[in-house]
Image: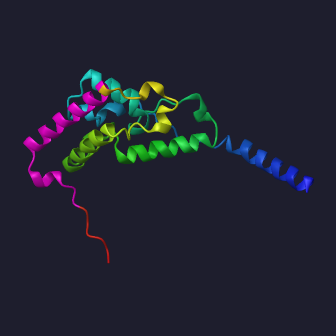
Amino acid sequence: MKKIIKNLFLLLFAILVIIQFIHPAKNIADEATLMTNDISKVYVVPDSVRQILKTSCYDCHSNNTVYPWYSKIQPVAWWLNDHIEEGKREINFSEFATYRIGRQYKKLDEIIKQVKEDEMPLSSYTLIHKNAILTKNQKLAISNWASAIIDTIKATNPADSLIIKRPPPKA
């Protein structure tokens, strides 16, 4: 029995060592690429709001992640990569200018709701990134900024363009 446990331990150790050499691609783009379709290309983003977004959102919601030291350790790197990919699927500030107006409208509305309800940034992120925890004033700044853009979108686009049409479910 001891030999089986020892062999199992050695196998697990070998697997742990081997996976250290397998890393996902980094989410890092050069500055020119980052700004091509950035949200700031279509909407004014005050410096104060930009700084909040960079500190609390961009690691998972842009094409440029600032990686912590523990991102070099597997399987943590895969877990972080999954969070980043999922975050970018939800909203990617680096690609925001490519979104249809209905999606932009919906995502800005979701930002307001999630910030007010403390759903973003994720608690698993703020556990380690204490500077990403939003204060009441920061939440208000983001909400006011997003609300102002929503008002602009409503004023300059037909109402039916703000609705994301989904195909009917298949029977």
Where on the picture, by quarter, is residue 38?
top left
Seen at 38% across and 41% down, the residue is: 119
Q: Residue furthest bottom?
A: 171
- Magenta stretch encompasses residue 88: no
Q: Residue furthest top?
A: 47
Residue 6 placement, left or right of 51: right
Residue 14 in the image: x percent, y percent? 78, 46
Question: Is 161 located above or below residue 63 in the figure?
Answer: below
Residue 104 in the image: x percent, y percent? 23, 44
Question: What colour scheme has been applied to the protein in the rendered image?
Answer: rainbow
Residue 37 in the image: x percent, y percent? 29, 37
How many labels were placed on the picture?
Answer: 0
Closest to the observer: 125 or 88?
A: 125
Residue 40 in the image: x percent, y percent? 25, 31
Span shown in magenta: 137-165
From the image, which quarter does the N terminus lie in? bottom right
Seen at 20% across and 29% down, the residue is: 44
- Magenta stretch encompasses residue 138: yes
From the image, which quarter does the C terminus lie in? bottom left
Closest to the observer: 37 or 126?
A: 126
**Is residue 8 something that shows in the picture?**
yes
Residue 110 placement, left or right of 18: left
Where on the picture, by quarter, is residue 79?
top right
Seen at 25% across and 27% down, the residue is: 141
Characterize the magenta stretch by its predominant secondary structure: helix
Question: Is 131 located above or below residue 167 in the figure?
Answer: above
Residue 40 placement, left or right of 117: left
Where on the picture, by quarter, is residue 51?
top left
Seen at 24% across and 24% down, the residue is: 46
